[in-house]
Image: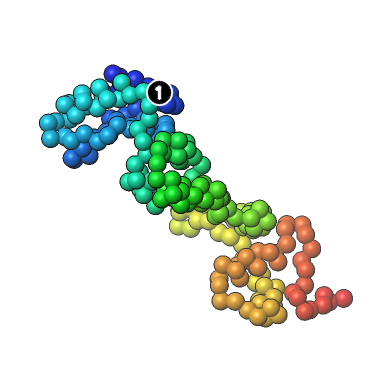
Amino acid sequence: MADDLLICAHCGSQPRFIANRFEAVIACTGCGMSTPPESLDAGRDQAHAILRGIWNTRLTPRPTEQHELSAIVRKELSSSDLGTVLALIARNEGDWEARGPLFAAMAEKLLQPEPFLQQIVPAEALLKDANRYRKLMRRAKIVHIDGRPWVHIEPLDALPATVSEELFGGTTILEEFLGRVLDTTPEPGEAVLPPLGKQPKP
């Protein structure tokens, strides 16, 4: 159905025919400009024909409506929504005093860091975890028991980490304790350091 629709005169993107159970619109996939909704009581083909006539003769964008602003301001906005928000502002023809706070709320959301950027682990923690993983991999071996292969990791001395826990207050989090065990485990070829608080024997 999109083959007989002209590209958006506002941004040059391709329009789409979008319908739910009761009504349909033709909307631009780029800037969000759309036709008024048309009832589907007479069928999808009839609604498409009416909307196609409106879309293909539209010369100016449809004014921004209140329900558009209310729907968008409630959703999480990212940099990909910048074009839609700018188009809403450009198409707004009135009620600036009432809609100004909504535009401001949208702009504030667009200025906030992307949600995935807030979840990025610091580089220092990633490097520490990578070093622990490498230590485990170097101690892993394949052993065969009853004809089946198993992954066996050589035992690691946990005493230095235990002493460290006693000195620094202790923890009940197993992941943190195992991390300290790996941190105190030397690389192959490195000298074994004595546990904290103990002196090496002469």
Q: Residues within 10 Å of mark 1 (few under 14, many from 20)?
A: some
Which residue is rendered at x = 35% and y = 32% of the image?
62
Q: Secondary structure at mark 1?
A: loop
Please tell me which residue lies in front, 34 or 154. Answer: 34
One can see residue 134 in this view: no
Q: Is residue 1 left or right of residue 29?
A: left
- Say which residue label 1 marks: 9
Quadrant location, the N terminus: top left
Tell me how the rendering is colored: rainbow
In this view, which residue lies farthest toward the left? 42
The x, y position of residue 21, in whole percent, is 18, 40
One can see residue 186 in this view: yes
Q: Is residue 84 left or right of residue 18?
A: right
Tag 1: amino acid: Ala
Quadrant of res 179: bottom right
Please tell me which residue lies in front, 169 or 51. Answer: 51
The x, y position of residue 174, in whole percent, is 55, 71
Residue 125 drawn above or below residue 46: below
The x, y position of residue 182, in whole percent, is 65, 64
Which residue is rendered at x = 34% and y = 45% of the image?
66
Quadrant of res 164: bottom right
Which residue is rendered at x = 74% and y = 74% of the image?
195
Residue 180 drawn above or below residue 36: below
Residue 194 drawn above or below residue 45: below
Which residue is rendered at x = 73% and y = 57% of the image?
188
Quadrant location, the C terminus: bottom right
